[in-house]
Image (cartoon, rainbow, N blue to C red):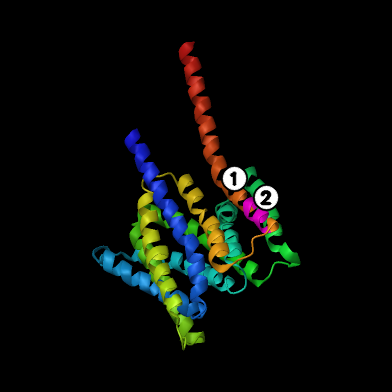
Amino acid sequence: MNRFHNRVLFADSALLIVALFWGLGFVAMKDGLDSFPIFWLTAVRFGSAFAIMLALFWSKIIDIKYREIKAGTIIGIFLFMGFVTQTLALKYTTVGKVAFLTTIYVIMVPFISWIFLKKHPGITAFIASLICLAGMGLLTQDSGFSAGTGEFLTLTCAVFFAIHLLLIEHFVKQMDPVLIAAVQIGVVALCSLLAAMAIETWPSQISSCSLWSIGFSSIFCTVLAFLIQTTAQKFTPSTHTAIILSLESVFGAIFGIILLGDPFTIKITAGFLLILIAVLITELMPYLKNITLRSKGNSSTAILKQE
């Protein structure tokens, strides 16, 4: 039991590192936008990450099957659309808002699943959505301004990430997650490169800060983060994974305030807290219900034994 508990604790700690990387990644990508247009930035980041994954997993990738290429391509297209809209949103709003509004994908998942899989999300999802809506209201109405382009783009990226998550759940059951990760990263790199060549020009000047930011995003936020997440999820429940990774929004907001000077007001803080509470309710309630049902089951068994 202690050995199992230690494995879960180690896996949860590793996922916390991933959340930290992704939170800092918001700041890194915002720095990268100072030199690179959006598609070139995404192409360089994911192209570098794909090259690293090829070097690390060549023996696996060389034997990849068509079904894994097909699944990874479909997943990668939605990942591409999610990252592009998220990165573009950073040009119009703060890191903290992008970080927190992106987290809404956790709440969107049950609703999208309801539409396509006909599974009712339950009353918990509706309650969480109302709390989330209140948080968004505080977040977007601070200092008298309304929801703008940055907020709209971030909500759009949250939809793409929600679909991306559901597609992974659908495909990865019968396939190697490492191969799926490699293909989707490669697809994002290819789509970004084609878009960049079609509508953008390569930057005339590139700052050293932007290069360091892209290097950090490629190695830590893409390659290492995906590898840690894949390995950690073998030892920890999916509920732990979702809750811990949702903390990327908290880290993103903190780093945005500390490193970029993003505003820190009471309204923004309250909005952040309400959205985070909505995310935690969505993830924790099913887990708590299972514990309650198990406790009732154990109590019933104990009573029957006494009788």
Q: Which residue is mark 2?
A: 131
Residue that appears at 42% across and 76% down: 211
Closer-to-camera residue (297/32): 32
Residue plotted at (27% across, 65% down): 56
Q: Answer yes or no: do the residues labelled 1 and 2 have beta carbons within 8 Å?
A: yes
Q: Residue 10 in the image: x percent, y percent?
A: 37, 45
In the image, 126: left or right of 167? right
For disc 1, the marked residue is 281
Q: Along the horizontal axis of the image, is 101 left or right of 51?
A: right
User: In which image quadrant can residue 46 be found?
Assistant: bottom left
Question: Where does the image place residue 121, in percent across and percent down from the top left?
Answer: 60, 47
Choose between 118 and 56: the one closer to the eye. 56
**Where does the magenta region start and end?**
268-274
Q: Quadrant of residue 138 in the image? A: bottom right
Left or right: residue 266 compared with residue 201 = right
Q: Earlier in the sequence, mark 1 or mark 2?
A: 2
Residue 118, above or below 34 = above
The quadrant the N terminus occupies is top left
Pinpoint residue 300: horizontal percent, then vertical percent: 51, 20
What is the x, y in percent for residue 27? Answer: 51, 67
* 48 part of magenta stretch: no
Residue 172 is at least partly visible in this image: yes
Residue 37 or residue 195, whichever sits in front: 37
Q: Is residue 270 magenta?
A: yes
| Crowdedness near tag 1: few (<14), some (14–19) or many (≥20) residues, C-alpha within 10 Å | some
Q: In the depicted view, which residue is nearer to us: 268 or 286?
A: 268
